[in-house]
Amino acid sequence: MGSAAVISPEGKKSEVVIEELTKGRKFAMQLQDLLVDYGGPKPEMSGVLVAEILRTFEQGLFLLGCPSGDQISDNLQAPGFSSDDGGVDISKRPKKRPDVNSSGRRGRYKWNSSQSHTIYSANIEDGQAWRKYGQKAILNAKFPRSYYRCTHKYDRCCNALKQVQGMEGGSGMYQITYIGSHTCNSDPIQPPHLIIPKGDNGHMAFPDRAREEVAAKSDLTDNFSLGSVQDHSSVPHLEEGYGDGWEVYGKDNAGQPDVELEDYFNLDDLIQLDESGF
DNA sequence: TCTATTTGACCACC
DNA sequence: GGTGGTCAAATAGA
């Protein structure tokens, strides 16, 4: 690690192949989610087909070394070993590593904002398998920020990250930022159930029409509250079906209230609505 | 014994 | 130099 990689035309080509395979796998996973939740004429057959598609992508990515994203090649190292020391068990090293040069690739990295989204939730559980890898006190923040990565980071090359920050004001809410998406096919987040129109000012034209939606879906009325926005691209038929000005709402796996993306809404209003309990 | 969490240190970015 | 993100040894818990 550390030496600059020279990308040959061949390497460039495999990069494109990997990118395409990764996309394909993601789409297959989304299709699987939809089939599971909405069924079809022959759900068992669909399930087999999707599983086969996924397996094909997994195999392809595996054969190519699974290097999607900018860190995966590093992450392929087994935990506890480092290529910098030629595979020496780091548990035998002193805690202060003597000469960690810049190739260690640690520190503060930027990510594309399009690859991240933030929700507010009273429950940090989302049904995914996360492993905490750090916690940090943040300047001007009352609560520390916790850092999680996908449990399958190494065994399935999954680069999904999650940051959880407790919110001020004793609301019991957490600001949860997801960076990247799961490519590990671990238990997916349940797809959204509710569609709520967006108002002119960018805030939700909530709650009247939303309540009608809730009433129309009796299976959601027992414990419904404002839901977290999921990745719209994962629900293409909904996105296309409702068009602009609509946002997708639901509740998380535990039925806990989530609150929408900060970019779209007035958080205070949403929390008040949520607490009103409809 | 294995796995997950904690926590101090390291490092990149501003 | 300050801050935030990640690493990894130490530790806790199952």
Image: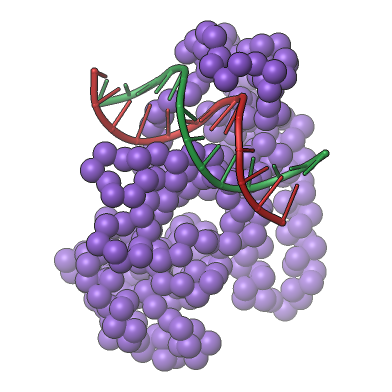
Chain colours: A purple, B green, C red
Q: Residue furthest left?
A: A201
Q: Residue at x 35, y 63 (%)?
A: A173
| Residue that appears at 50% across and 91% down | A218
Query: Where does residue A230 sit, x and y in percent of width and height?
Result: 45, 61
Query: Would residue A8 be seen by someone viewing this image from the given angle?
Result: no
Q: Residue A199 at what x, y percent from top left?
A: 22, 71
Lateral position of residue A135 relative to residue C1, left or right: right
**A266 w.r.t. A220: above or below:** above
Viewer-closest of A28 and A253: A253
Q: Camera-side residue: C9 or A3?
A: C9
Instruction: Locate residue A44, reporting x and y percent.
Output: 79, 72
Q: Indicate whether A171 appears above or below A214.
A: above
- Which quarter of the picture shows residue A85? top right
- The relative height of residue A101 versus residue C2 in the rendered view (above or below) is above
- Given residues A143 and A254, the one toward you in this image is A143
Residue nearest the viewer, comparing C13 with A218: C13
Q: Position of residue A176 (x, y in %)?
A: 41, 54
